[in-house]
């Protein structure tokens, strides 16, 4: 039996020439999503692409043959922007697109700057603040006028509490747009935060300095074998002044008691190497008198001075010469109330008899009187 010979004539048409090869981007993305799990090179996902696959190499060659680094960088920027518009679920894809654009090594600095600043934007939203700041720096290197890069760098720096760095980014941006409201808001916020930090640092430094000074004062007192007691008299002055240190010299608050007229004077800072007479000359100069000194007997070189140490020498005072320094007196007696106390009485006053015979026991140490 003879088999029938069937001739099949394949007709060619001009249909391909009339086909619209322009593919809608949304349709293309749909196809990529639909077939990315299949072994179709055109739609394979990034994580399964094999650079050694000859089919992949051929496709990439077809895609890139007519493109320049500049055009490719721009296309990756556009694709990255589209991924970004899709929301957080596509942020990683957007980052990958911007990164590919950067790797084209384009000579178009504007596009390069946009690629970096766009990627920085996503890093900022993802709270990858270090990456954001780095990209903003690269972006501004490519194009110093990129205000968005300056803003995002400032914002990320602010989130990391790098307030001075934030101000640097803001100031850079304001050079090119000094009326930018967003930058001005960041400027004020960064400035306020920085001032707050600096104020706290100053307080901390003062506290540390004060603590260090107190430690040094205590060390000196210990080395000199001083016995430091609480203030003898509970006056307001004694609660707000302490023994301080200046140029390695102790500075004392001094209480002056004028027993005869029942008055109290206070010297806020008396250097330990100052003489008693140095202070008396200021208080009782001799060419003018206090209104209560009607007899004009309180003159600096006509006064009797008594030092009171307090515990364990209660109701006891030491007579001291006006030519002695505070240190010489304390070195001899070794007992210091928190606020060293001196009684002052006019040597010619009748009250001095009552003071030395009835009220206090007076110790007359030759080393303190002469």
Image (tube, rainbow, N blue to C red):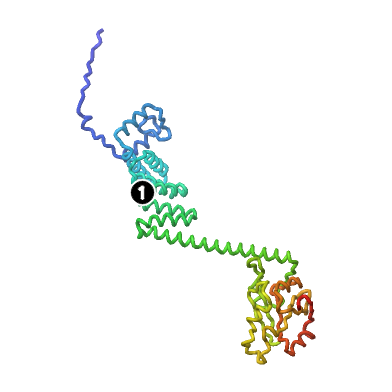
Nearer to the camera, 118 or 92: 118
Position of the N terminus by quadrant: top left
Q: Residue at x 49, y 62 (%)?
A: 195
Nearer to the camera, 137 or 161: 137
Above or below 181: residue 313:
below
Please state if 369 lies on the left or on the right of 240 as rendered.
right
Q: Residue 225: horizontal and vertical position, in percent?
A: 75, 66
Label 1 neighbour load within 10 Å: few <14, some 14-19, many 20+: some
What residue is disc 1 on? Answer: 143
Q: Residue 206: horizontal and vertical position, in percent?
A: 58, 64
Farthest residue, direction top? 1
Position of the C terminus by quadrant: bottom right
Residue 220, quarter of the rendered image: bottom right
Q: Residue 361: horizontal and vertical position, in percent?
A: 79, 81
Residue 100, quarter of the rendered image: top left
Q: Residue at x 55, y 61 (%)?
A: 201
């Amino acid at each position: 039996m003879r088999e029938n010979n069937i001739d099949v004539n394949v007709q060619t048409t001009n249909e391909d020439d009339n086909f619209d090869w322009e593919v809608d981007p949304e349709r293309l993305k749909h196809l990529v999503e639909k077939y990315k799990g299949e072994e179709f090179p055109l739609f394979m996902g990034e994580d399964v692409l094999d650079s050694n696959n000859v089919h992949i190499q051929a496709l990439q060659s077809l895609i890139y043959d007519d493109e320049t680094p500049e055009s490719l960088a721009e296309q990756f920027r556009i694709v990255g922007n589209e991924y970004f518009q899709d929301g957080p679920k596509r942020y990683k894809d957007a980052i990958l697109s911007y990164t590919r654009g950067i790797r084209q090594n384009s000579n178009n600095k504007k596009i390069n700057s946009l690629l970096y600043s766009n990627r920085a934007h996503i890093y900022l939203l993802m709270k990858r603040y270090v990456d954001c700041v780095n990209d903003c720096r690269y972006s501004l290197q490519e194009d110093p006028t990129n205000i968005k890069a300056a803003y995002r760098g400032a914002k990320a720096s602010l989130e990391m509490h790098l307030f001075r760095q934030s101000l640097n980014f803001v100031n850079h941006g304001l050079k090119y747009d000094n009326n930018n409201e967003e930058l001005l808001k960041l400027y004020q916020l960064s400035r306020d935060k920085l001032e707050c930090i600096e104020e706290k640092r100053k307080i901390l430094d003062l506290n540390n300095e004060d603590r260090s000074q107190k430690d040094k004062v205590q060390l000196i007192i210990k080395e000199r074998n001083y016995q430091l007691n609480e203030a003898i008299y509970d006056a307001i002055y004694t609660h707000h002044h302490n023994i301080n240190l200046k140029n390695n010299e102790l500075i004392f608050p001094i209480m002056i008691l004028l027993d005869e007229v029942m008055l109290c004077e206070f010297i806020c800072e008396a250097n330990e190497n100052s003489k008693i007479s140095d202070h008396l000359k200021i208080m009782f100069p001799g060419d003018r008198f206090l209104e209560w000194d009607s007899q004009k007997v309180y003159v600096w070189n006509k006064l009797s001075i008594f030092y009171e140490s307090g515990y364990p020498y209660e109701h006891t005072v030491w007579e001291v010469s006006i030519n002695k320094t505070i240190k010489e007196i304390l070195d001899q007696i070794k007992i210091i109330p928190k606020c060293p106390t001196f009684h002052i009485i006019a040597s010619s006053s009748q009250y001095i008899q009552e003071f030395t015979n009835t009220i206090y026991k007076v110790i007359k140490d030759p080393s303190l009187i002469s």
